[in-house]
Image (spheres, helix red, strand yellow):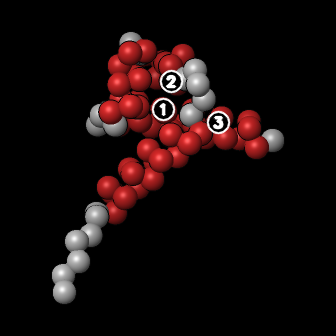
Amino acid sequence: MNRLSTPPNQRSISEMHDFIEKWLPARYTHSVNLILKDEKKDPAYIRQVKNRKTDDRKITDALYTVAKLNRLQVEK
């Protein structure tokens, strides 16, 4: 019997979104813009990328970084 499998890249992106959902603080758009520095985005667009899981790798990476920092602060 053949099994359908998800590509490793898709699996890691899904795990990243799960981590972001779990650990992202309530107010995160300003922190994401601090990480992006020169390429600041509108807060509404950042929320759209997070909520709709839009494929914008830079913002997703910044959201993941903010979530990791929040996890470190909460677990101290």
In this view of the protein, which residue sits in the foreground, 11 or 34? 11
In contact (CB < 8 Å): disc 1 and disc 3: no
In this view of the protein, which residue sits in the foreground, 48 or 12? 48
Q: Position of residue 30 (x, y in %)?
A: 54, 16
**Is residue 49 visible in this depiction of the protein?**
yes
- Image-based side of 3 in relation to 44, left or right: left
In the picture of the structure, the residue carrying the numbered disc 1 is: 62
**Above or below — where is 55 with respect to 15?**
above
Q: Amino acid at mark 3?
A: Leu
Q: Residue at x 67, y 41 (%)?
A: 71
Q: Amino acid at mark 2?
A: Val
Q: Earlier in the sequence, mark 1 or mark 3?
A: 1
In contact (CB < 8 Å): disc 1 and disc 2: yes
Q: Residue at x 34, y 37 (%)?
A: 53
Q: Amino acid at mark 1?
A: Ala
Q: Which mark is residue 32?
A: 2
Q: Residues within 10 Å of mark 1 (few under 14, many from 20)?
A: many
Provide the secondary structure element on which disc 3 rests. helix
Q: Which mark is residue 2?
A: none
Residue furthest out toward the left? 2
How many angstroms separate mark 1 from mark 3 (CA)? Answer: 11 Å
- Image-based side of 11 in relation to 67, left or right: left
Quadrant housing the C terminus: top right
- Image-based side of 73 in relation to 57, left or right: right
Q: Position of residue 68 (x, y in %)?
A: 61, 40
In this view of the protein, which residue sits in the foreground, 63 or 37? 63
How many angstroms separate mark 1 from mark 2 (CA)? Answer: 6 Å
**Above or below — where is 18 with respect to 33?**
below
Q: Earlier in the sequence, mark 3 or mark 2?
A: 2
In the picture of the structure, the residue carrying the numbered disc 3 is: 69
